[in-house]
Image (cartoon, helix red, strand yellow):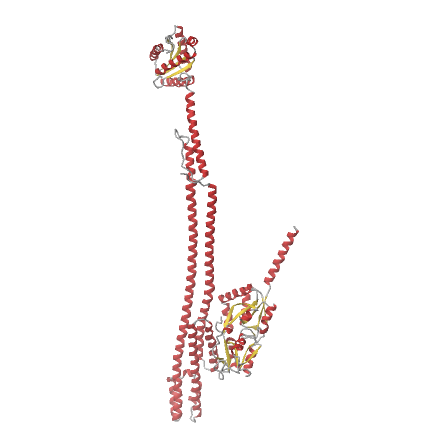
Amino acid sequence: MRRSQLKMSITLVIAVLSILCVFTIALLLTSSLLKGISDNAGKTVNHYLPELVRTHQGALKVEQIHRYLDAAYRVQNAAEERSYRLLLQVLVHSFMLDDDDYLISEANNIMFDIQELLYIRHTQRALLEEILDIVDQSDAELAFVRGVFSSISVKNIREDIMQPPLNQLSVNLSEDDYSEVQYRVRFIIDLNEQLDMLVIDAHQRIAGLANYLTTDAVLRTRQISDEVGKDATLVSFYFSILIAILVFFSLMILITFHKLILRPVQQLVLGLRSIENQGDTTVKLPKMYFKELDLIRHSIEEYSELTHRLQAVNSDLERLSQIDGLTGLANRRMLDTKLNSEVKRSKRYHHPLSILMIDIDHFKKLNDEYGHQVGDQGLKLLAEVLQRFTQRPGELAARFGGEEFVLVLPESNISNAIEMAKMILVESRKIVFPEYPEIKFSVSIGISCFQKGVSDSAELLINHADKALYQAKSAGRDCFRLYD
Amino acid sequence: MFSKLKLTMTVIILLFSISRIYASPLIIATEGVYPPFSYFNEAGELTGFDVDIAQALCEVMQRECTIVTIAWSDLLDGLEAGDFDAIIASMAKTEERARRALFSNHYYRSQTTFVGDPRRFISIAPEALESKRLSAGLDSIQATFLNQNYPNSDIVLTDNLDESFELLKLGQVDLVLTDSINSLGFLTSPEGFAFDFIGEPIIDPILVAEARIAVQLGNESLVEEFNQAILQLRLSGAYDRINRKYVPFSIY
């Protein structure tokens, strides 16, 4: 299955652009919503505040009506009453400008009360005039009573204070006149009581109106604060959404970056590191999401395979550099390395070490008579024998050069070495060439053993073995000699 | 190089002239014979509600203002001719006036009521006032209203309301139709003692007495400036102070 892969650069550009788009849209939406809210708030202010001020002014006007009413009730002369009434009239009528039926009808009711009040006052004054006329027409000595009636204000004509002057009049006036006066005084007193009721009624209406306007103002204030509060809640709501979008996208970016870029890069780095210790297997990595990273993954895997091949070639080369091509025994270089290390061990731990130098007898003659191929065959056959005798760990059979071989035998003392030499001599004699059974094969052996102060270096050991070999050759071949 | 310099100079000159236009003082026209809104007091100074409001508005707008008095009938002509920038003269907005000037929001409201002798008149129905002499200001909304609704009455138009009240006192007209607050001054004066409001305030679309500020057609920015200034005056309480100085209750 092939998963479609995206280019990281293009993906990044698309991601950044889409994030910008989303932010722009979110910002535009939020800002337009915020603008709507602020417009709304502006409208609230423009709509409710003047109305609030108007309601407040209405309340003030009602207060003024109250004051004018009291003044009109209290003043004595008709002229003042009239000017208060005119003011009240315009004031009450001004409520008609507002589109509020309750306000208008109550204002009119108050106006009626006021007109009623003024009418009653007018009647009372007329009655008082008539009383004064009657008193004036009488001949009796009524200065006190006349004084009382001309100075008293109609609103003070009450039952209790009118009794003394009435008593005086009942004595001094004719019965008819007295009953006329008494009737009018009673009328004024009754009208006063009626007026009191009227004023109480008007006050109640005014109080009701004031209450209505105040409640209205309180309601408006509540409305303003409610609407402003609603707007504020909306603003905070939209901001929360904006912040949520911000957080969401940041998290998305982080997770995406972590999943699609950071972790793959870490995997790639780990893969690259593990090439060093990959052993027999090559490094395999999971497929990457982005093309660029996948390219790197490919390169790492290829590099791993290349390294694997190089390591194989390297180990082959190493092996080849230590082996003699013809016989498959160790070559001279390996012999030198091995012998040096064995000499060091023997020196340090005082372990015995012997070397055997083996040379094929009459090898030159073999070559000349039967050809090089047979000579080489002889070398190979001997090598097989020597290989057989050096199976213990640490032991080594090496081709020293030409038809000369060296055996390195750690842990072998002189007698062990002699034993080995004897066995090799026996086994060498048994070597048979299948095509040329008449050929007699034998070797000569020189032995040297590690001995401090005498043979305590690789060179000396080889040198001494060579000398011992020479002695063996001199002694007629197919034998061994020990260097001493 | 030189053209650049020229351009800069032009811009500077342009800016300078704009700022000069902006800072130029406003000329505001009012009537001067319409107490308590605009009139000359005993000391001969122009005063009144309209005048004080005009000054307060200028203060809020931070503009220098000159107030001039113009006869009522010449106000709109003068505005159109550009003799002044605004009319603050208790002018209500009518269809006809709206064709000649731009109007702000209202800065006070009032009603129209008949004034006359209460012993002679009770009803104000057109039938009851047939062949009676009714007076109103020339070119006023009251004049329009009378012409439309009292065709059988004798309508006497005067140049200003002082004249109308004078005619009423002399018995040359029977009733005067005008603004209640304007009448109040006359009625509470000793001369007006014999007279009174006749009937209820008249409710009619023609008589929507909302006083507005008039400016030249097309000068929307100045109207907006006035509207904002009116709102500010009301909210700051300055309006109420001026109101109380001339009328003992709120007339907004």
Q: Quadrant of residue A380?
A: top left
Q: Is residue A328 above or below residue B224?
A: above
Q: Is residue A115 above or below residue A10?
A: below
Which quarter of the image is occupied by the C terminus of chain A? Answer: top left
Residue A253, horizontal then vertical, whole percent: 43, 45
Is A132 rendered above or below residue A218? below
In percent of width and height, residue A110 lies at: 42, 76
Query: Can you give x and y, in whole percent of width and height, for residue A180 in the image?
Result: 40, 90
Residue B60 visible here: no
Viewer-side residue, B216 vs A346: B216
Q: Nearer the viewer, residue A95 or A72?
A: A95
Q: Is residue B42 left or right of residue A51?
A: right
In the figure, residue A333 lies in which quadrant? top left
The quadrant in which residue A179 appears is bottom left
How many numbered marks appear? 0
Specify the farthest residue to the right: B2
Q: Where, quadrant-wise, is the N terminus of chain A in this rendering?
A: top left
Side of A407 where B90 appears, left or right = right
In front of the other: B51 or A429: A429
